[in-house]
Amino acid sequence: MTQDITRLLADWDYEPGELRVRKIDGDDGEPKIQIRMDLGLMQLAWQGRPDGTRPHDTDSLLTYFRAQQTEHEAESTDPYQMSREQCWALGQEALQYYWRRISFFELQEYAAAEADADHNLEILDICEHHAEHEEDRQLADQYRVFVTSHRIQARALSMLDKESHTDALVEIREGIETVEGLLRDLGDPEALDSSPELQYLRQWADEVEGKQPLTKVEQLRVDLKQAVEREQFERAASLRDELKEFDNQDQGTRN
């Protein structure tokens, strides 16, 4: 069997700058993600660590270091610390989860994208609190806004998929406040106006609010206005009766 993947690349149309992602069934019977890139293909496991490995016989390096932290704190009063090499290794794992996260977005697997964002936020947490070197702690802060923004998007998109526009809008608005708080904590007030993540969330909130479905009463009022403008008087009378019923029900509830 040839090891040349030229035929595979030729069979998958690709435009530079575009992200092409697909879900396939692996030879082991498990689903996989494939990403078409300018230099070839990337394949990721659908579940577990994206590269399909089990470092130290655990689900991920994060799981392994969390276990190490728990063991250390049970045996010692000294702070648990992580070396530069350990933080770097976690950073490489975070990169794998990043690629799979953006792939899940493309495949509209928003719950899975949220889970991978949570994984990377926990990597940032452990490095921020336990890295031996200040540079590694600062590096964790550098990516927190970006990953948090992805998590907010994943949650809101899941809600929009279920046509829960109100819940999605609440999630985005609360997410904006979260990101604003993170930027203030980083001591960068100018980023409140320049942060691309914050700008995107604010614009998205306005779009979702503008597309939010009308309530039954709001729709009846729109229909009534149109009926009057078109001199459809019988329909207008019927719509007024429906609106009165809603008003009576509302008054009864309040009483």
Image: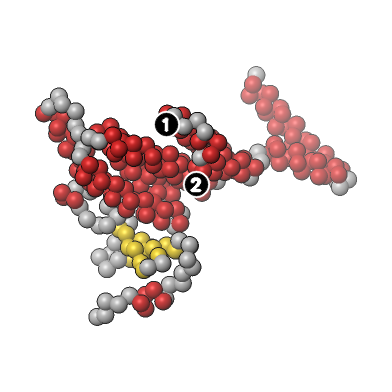
Say if mark 2 contacts mark 1, CB within 8 Å. no
Query: Relative to 10, is 163 on the left or the right?
Result: right
Q: Which residue is mark 1?
A: 186
Q: Is residue 101 above or below residue 65?
A: below
Q: Name the spot of residue 249 as percent of width and height, x first.
A: 67, 28
The residue that appears at 14% across and 32% down in the rendered structure is 72
Which quadrant does the N terminus fall into? bottom left
Query: Relative to 232, is 149 on the left or the right?
Result: left
Which residue is more in the foreground, 150 or 40?
40
Disc 1 on helix, strand or loop? loop
Q: Name the spot of residue 84 as percent of width and height, x first.
A: 22, 42
| Three-letter residue code for mark 1 | Leu
Q: Which residue is mark 2?
A: 157
Q: Name the spot of residue 10 as percent of width and height, x first.
A: 41, 76
Disc 2 on helix, strand or loop? helix
The residue that appears at 45% across and 41% down in the rendered structure is 149
- Residue lying farthest left? 75
Q: Name the spot of residue 242 as percent of width and height, x first.
A: 74, 37
Residue 238, quarter of picture: top right
Which residue is more in the foreground, 9 or 247?
9
| Three-letter residue code for mark 2 | Leu
Query: Relative to 28, is 121 on the left or the right?
Result: right
